[in-house]
Image (cartoon, coloured by chain):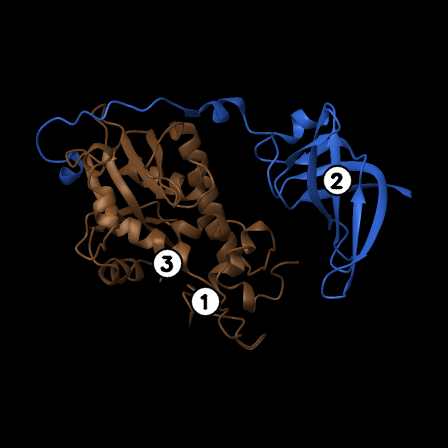
Chain colours: A blue, B brown
Amino acid sequence: MNNFSTVATIVKAPESIKLGERPGMRVRLVDKTYGKKAVDRFFTGIFSGQDLDVLARLKVGDQIFVSGGLIQEEYTNKAGVVVKDDNMPYAKLLQVAKSASFFAKKEEADDVQATAAPDLTAPAGPSPLDGI
Amino acid sequence: MPWARASSLHRHMECTAASYLPRLDRGKWSDGYMPSLHNDKRPLTDPPEGPTAAADWGTAMHLAKADREAAAEPFASMWDPYRVNLYPPNLGRHEVALSYDCATGAIERGPSNRPTSEMDAWKNTRAASCVVGTCDWLGVLPSGVAWVDDLKTGWQIPDVVTPQTLFYGLVASKLTRVEECQLSITHWPKRSREPTRENLWYKVGPLALLSFESELQEAWKRMTSRVVERPGPWCKYCPSASVCSKAGM
């Protein structure tokens, strides 16, 4: 196991999981920030604690600074192919690097609001849309 | 030919190649919205074989919702008890074709509730800088605010505020000249006996609409400046995925 820190991009929406009795989140990430020649490195980070509040505000495509021990898993699938996958079971979110939803201005975020169903009692007559 | 359709706008705003690559729609290949640059890169593969039952069910439900002649049974009968209450005819129209020109900001309202071929013909004649789409329901609430509803028939609880609904909301707010809009989703999954809009109402204000319009115009500028395949979750249902060199990476 080695310690690995990088800027990673979220490629799959954070998924809520249970770590024993504690809530956690599983996030599929890719490290692809080091230029064209670098190989994109996919891994799954397991987060817990205060990181969850921040992760709940992130979306696919957002970039985060992440750190943790990276473990390589290897197994043979049904087709007989050896599959290797990287996992970061105790990932720590250091910082959010890029995220429209996280850094959205408060006013803008407040501008989209869930509402109750409006009154649909239609006045008699043609649709107002017909006059447009 | 417009560069993007509202239903796949989330993809076009992320990946410029989605506008250029050939598309596999319902088992048939067609050119990309923009002139294809990648035909010589990879050969077109055979269409994947798979059930289209879910898509067919969705199409049938949309036809029945709009009370079209082509609506088949039992879908038309399923909708009969709900149609007028959910979509008061005095408030709006079903299946309205809309267009937004990213270069000029101009909007256009096309035919509504007409055969698909006629709607597509109108959409295909819009300029290359346009985004086009068919809004499932476009109305004006008694309060004067534009109201956009989208019918979703998948099993997952759908997101209400998406690039697709924001696009319709943007055009609707410009049409009504009221700087906000009401979005809703009518959710009728296959397993359900009746449609619902519970917790599926959102109001979008002027700041968010303005911000979305800027994003749309930036996406169009990116598209015209450089074609880049940008893989991501939007590749999942991309009709060009089987000819894209980066899809699924």
Residue B16 shows in this picture: yes
Q: Label 2 amino acid?
A: Gly
Residue visible at 43% across and 35% down in the picture: B161
User: Would you name the residue on which mark 1 appears?
Assistant: B24
Figure quadrant of the C terminus of chain B:
bottom right
Residue visible at 44% across and 52% down in the picture: B8
**Above or below: residue B10 compared with residue B24:** above
**Above or below: residue A78 compared with residue A24:** below
View extreme (right): residue: A1
Figure quadrant of the N terminus of chain B:
bottom left
Residue visible at 49% across and 22% down in the picture: A107
- Mark 3 vs mark 1: give the one in front: 1
Assess whether mark 1 and mark 2 are in contact (beta carbons under 8 angstroms).
no
- Mark 2 vs mark 3: give the one in front: 2
User: Would you name the residue on which mark 3 appears?
Assistant: B2
User: x%, y% of residue B131?
Assistant: 37, 52
Q: How far apart are the alpha carbons under marks 3 and 1?
A: 17 Å
| Total number of numbered discs in the rendering | 3
User: x%, y% of residue B16?
Assistant: 52, 57
Q: How far apart are the alpha carbons under marks 2 and 1?
A: 34 Å
**Above or below: residue B39 compared with residue B167:** below
Give left or right: position of A108 versus B146.
right
User: Would you name the residue on which mark 2 appears?
Assistant: A45
Residue A48 is labelled as none
Location of residue A29 by image quarter: top right
Residue B109 shows in this picture: no
Same chain letter for marks 2 and 1 = no
